[in-house]
Structure formats: structure tokens, C-alpha cells
Amino acid sequence: MGLNELIKKGETFYNQVQSSEFGGDYIKGEDYEQWITEVAIHMEKESLPSVIKNRLDKTLENAVGNGAEYLETILGILKAVNKNGNK
């Protein structure tokens, strides 16, 4: 799966944001977990600065079961890499 496909698929998860009874929101599920793994596999092939790689790794590790801000960070990184044409 290429960056454009990962971005499009990731944007669909905004529809799956759920509200927690304790406040805040979260996203979880097998499809979300699979997408996160696909992002990790794809981004391992990219030549990313260590600060971006580290931020992405931490975000991917904590994304499932947490708020939409994790999804926003992942999508932001994917879009920036796509825009800058990293291979």
C-alpha cells in the first residue's frame, strides 16, 4: 500500500472516533490496528530524520485505544512525507 492509499484509509477512521464514558475520545478495532501496522511497515522504508521517526514510532505505539490526536499526528506525518516526495 502506497502513501496515498494509507492517507485515504487513515482518514476513514475519523468516522470511528468514539466517546469515552470517562471523557475524551478513542479509536480502536482490528482495521485500525492493521492500518497502524501497514503504516509502520511502509514508513520503515522511508529515509526519515530521527526526530520524525521517533515521534511516529511513539505515536503508532500508543494510537490504539487513544484519542483522535494520535490519528492526526500519523496523518500529518504521512502527508508531509508524501508532499516532500521521500522514497
Image (cartoon, helix red, strand yellow):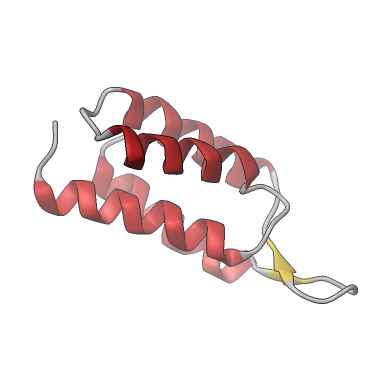
57 or 71, nearer to the observer:
57
Quadrant the C terminus occupies: top left
Q: Position of residue 52 (x, y in %)?
A: 33, 42
Q: In the visual, does 65 lie left or right of 43? A: right
**Camera-nearest residue between 10 and 64:** 64
Considering every residue shown, the one lying at the far front of the view is 51
**Residue at 65% of width from left, 68% of height from top?**
17
Q: Nearer the viewer, residue 38 or 50?
A: 50
Judged left or right of residue 22, residue 6 is left
Residue found 64% across the figure and 44% down from its top: 62
Can you give x and y, in whole percent of width and height, for residue 66 in the image?
Answer: 69, 57
Examine the rendered structure and indicate whether residue 71 appears above or below residue 18. above
Asked whether 36 or 67 is in front, the reply is 67
Q: Position of residue 7 (x, y in %)?
A: 34, 53
| Vertical placement of residue 79 versus 85, above or below | below
Residue under the point 82% across and 76% down: 23
